[in-house]
Amino acid sequence: MKKITIKEKECILLEEESNHLFIQPVDAHDLEEIENERKEVSYPFSLLLYPINNWNEELSPWKNEPVFGNQGFGEGAKETLDFIQKNILPMFIDKKIYLCGYSLAGLFSLWASYQSDAFVGIVAASPSVWFPGWLEYTRNHPLHTKKVYLSLGDKEENTKNPVMKTVGDCIRTYYEETKEKIPCILEWNQGNHFKDTGKRVGKGIEWMLKEL
């Protein structure tokens, strides 16, 4: 594990002898789960951890009112993706590049696959596909990646929040529509949104590498 500074952005690179590089937007909790994530993967791979300071702003594809708490959602996903494409990808031109992420970072990873053909596969663990307007967006934009891994906890839709409780129906619908276009899997995990977060991302990376 080594820290690398990219255009004043301090990232963490976990490098192995592999031509597969997964880029993962992370917060402090994700960093605590990285070892659990890596334990799930039996294949060699490299992982670039991209720190996110403002989760709701930097990973949201478009503005939206608060769904929980008082913080709304910005539209910083484009800026985040631009930084990755302009400053990170040129450093790894010899690698096959994937995006992976948990929760809103999972949604960002999926959204990025509609913007760019730079990513071979997407691992979206418990992604925020409840995000208002998401399904409509995907139906009106072309998908550019080759494979998608989706997962969700089997208790995540059991919430009183009227928006977030749609996550189960949304991910089922998204999976059915996506698998008609490219190889795609939807895996169900035990527990709510906060259980085994690193393990869930790792299971997605394992599937992606096994499929290759």
Image (tube, rainbow, N blue to C red):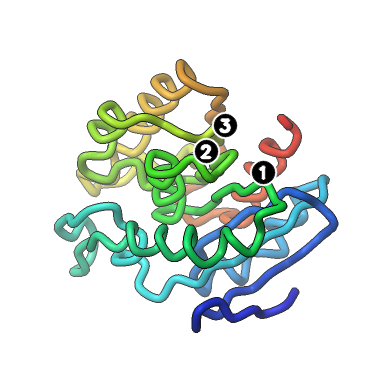
**In which quadrant of the rendered image does the N terminus lie?**
bottom right
User: Picture coordinates of residue 40 (x, y %)?
Assistant: 74, 49
Residue beneath label 2, please?
A: 151
Q: Are marks 2 and 1 in contact (CB under 8 Å)?
A: yes
Does residue 120 appear to the left or right of 168 in the view shown?
right
Residue type of the residue flagged with mark 1: Lys
The residue labelled by disc 3 is: 147
Q: Point out the tag, 2 or 1, that comes first from the N-terminus.
A: 2
Disc 2 to disc 1, C-alpha distance: 9 Å
Q: Are marks 3 and 2 in contact (CB under 8 Å)?
A: no
Place of residue 2 in the rendered image (x, y in percent of width and height, measured from the top left)? 72, 77
Three-letter amino acid code at the position of disc 3: Lys
The image quarter containing residue 17 is bottom right
Taking 192 as reference, is 211 left or right? right
Mark positioned earlier in the residue sequence (1 or 3):
3
* Residue labelled with disc 1: 203
